[in-house]
Amino acid sequence: MTRLQARSLSVDLGRRRALSAIDLTLESGRFTVIVGPNGAGKTTLLRSLAGLLAPAEGTVTLDGAPVARLRAADRARAIAYLPQSGTVAWPLPVRAVVALGRLPHGEEPDALPAAGREAVAQAMAAADLAGFEDRPATELSGGERARVLLARALATKAPVLLADEPVAALDPRHELVVLEVLRAQARAGAMVVAIMHNLTLAARFADEIVLLDRGRLEAHAPPEEVLTEARLAASFGISAHVSREEGGLVVVAESPLPQG
Amino acid sequence: MLPSRPSLIAGLALLLAVLSLASLAVGPAPIPAVTAAKALVSDQGAAGIVVREIRLPRTLLSLLVGWIFGITGAALQGLLRNPLADTAVFGAPQAAALGAVLVLYFGLVGALSWALPVAAIAGALVSIALVVAVAGRNATVVVLVLAGLAVGSLAGAGTSLAISLSPNPFAVTEIVFWLLGSFEDRSSVHVLMAAPFILIASVLVLAAAPGLRALALGEETARSLGVDVRRLRVLIVAGAAIGTGASVAVAGSIGFVGLVAPHLVRPFVGYDPARTLVPAGLAGAALLLAADCAVRLIPSSAEIKIGVLTAILGVPFFLWVIARRKAELAETPA
């Protein structure tokens, strides 16, 4: 059982306070989706949880240990982090990019042991990348590259997976493929946290939703409790219609509300 | 099918052996290659003296300087995730030359003093620090190149000022010729002066190599994979400054080897930035050694400066890379 916990976490970006007094407890086996309007602090929260951003106040702990003080290799084995809109600088073959996920285990991409090769193969299969092994990563479409980078994060086999907009560049089919992979990771015992903008998909796949607004935690609960018409109006500034269909909520944004 | 990395390295090593022998044999007084090889280990009369005293230091310096240019070029390209990065982007060679010119021609030390490479290294470090400070850590390529251009121009102006203020016309000629870059008339003292610094620079840069692979996916991902990106940056920048400073101090300003060498070997190592370094160093040594043989063979009254030759060959290559990759270069943050 893994527990990732933020306690009165405040983070500054430059002189701006990006997150204020966040208290959040995340547990393994759950798929949590972070939603919120642009500039709400979603990415800042994810980076802080990953130990990549030092808090101004408060702490982030992994099973009681502050992530900021973990050894870099230990942290990298425990927490896989997938940044938003990642790029690949060199025309590395897809297989080599995915194999980078084994670095935290001290496995060199060109000399993977059996366990590493197995992890890479599983990750590629999960991200629907059969046949892509030798393609240069720079020659893929945005959505294909996003799946390659997701496979890289999966290959680490970390108990915690933090993904910043993993489905932003994907077509509808691959959106579902990736969300199913993330949910399956959670069902298999991992803690999965993803940032998303599509509220209907978030509601359908997430076990719990974290709603951020202007650096504050507005709600952390199952989708039907968080994604209410009143909350969407208050946080997103939209009038929305939320209905309950077979398979989950459907959130239809209807019109922007006047600001102020 | 491209040859694998071990056969690439073996091939480059063989090429270096052949070029080294050629470098010992070629010159105003041609010496048969067999005699040249024998002269290294036995007495061969006048030919032996030419080989050991004149051509051997020159050959060793070309190897050392070409090697460090190759690995620092590859490391900087990996660090900045940009195929056009080189020490010249930071104005480092000009700044190193200014550092050396200042101590040399204001009579602080003699031309064979240890202070010369130290001053050149200091100049290179200042220029890189200045460019990074001005351009910022997440600078785009355009900002980086402009900042490097400005710093390089400033250093060049400083050197010109030193030349104009120099009271001695012979000293002026000497500075100008030295700035063009050459391995002519270098002795074993120059080799001993540069070698320790180039060794230190190689250790620093090669220590950073494994982290470059993860950096291909960006700084954030590299950090999440447990790579200490700050340490990587310090190692490579320090290594590049020390290597450039030591090279400029003994050979003057020689450009474009560090830019070209990594490109030649990258396809053979699957574009893996970590595995590019050593082959790029060997390719750099081979390029510089070949160029140094070429300047001795090109008929002219005085020997053509190797820095001029590498620029004449290197600049069109630079332009070709820009033309081929301009679409992606417009967007890439450094």
Image (spheres, coloured by chain):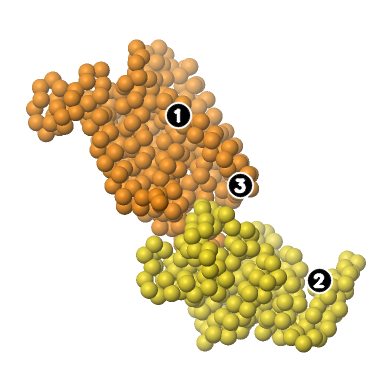
Chain colours: A yellow, B orange
**Is residue A103 found left or right of B219 in the rendered image?**
left
Label 2 sits on a secondary structure element that is helix
Q: Which residue is mark 1?
A: B313
Question: In the figure, residue B27 lies in which quadrant?
Answer: top left
Residue B303's spot in the image, x, y percent?
A: 34, 18
- Identify the residue at horizontal 49%, vertical 34% (top origin): B317
Label 1 sits on a secondary structure element that is helix
Image mark 3: chain: B
Identify which amino acid the numbered label 2 is placed on.
Answer: Phe
Camera-nearest residue between A217 and B281: B281
Q: Which residue is mark 2?
A: A236
* Distance from the alpha carbon under mark 2 to that under mark 3: 35 Å
Query: In this rendering, is residue B214 above or below B41?
Result: below
Tell which circle, 1 or 3, labels the residue nearer the N-terminal end.
1
Residue B12's spot in the image, x, y percent?
A: 31, 43
- Identify the residue at horizontal 40%, vertical 58% (top origin): B210
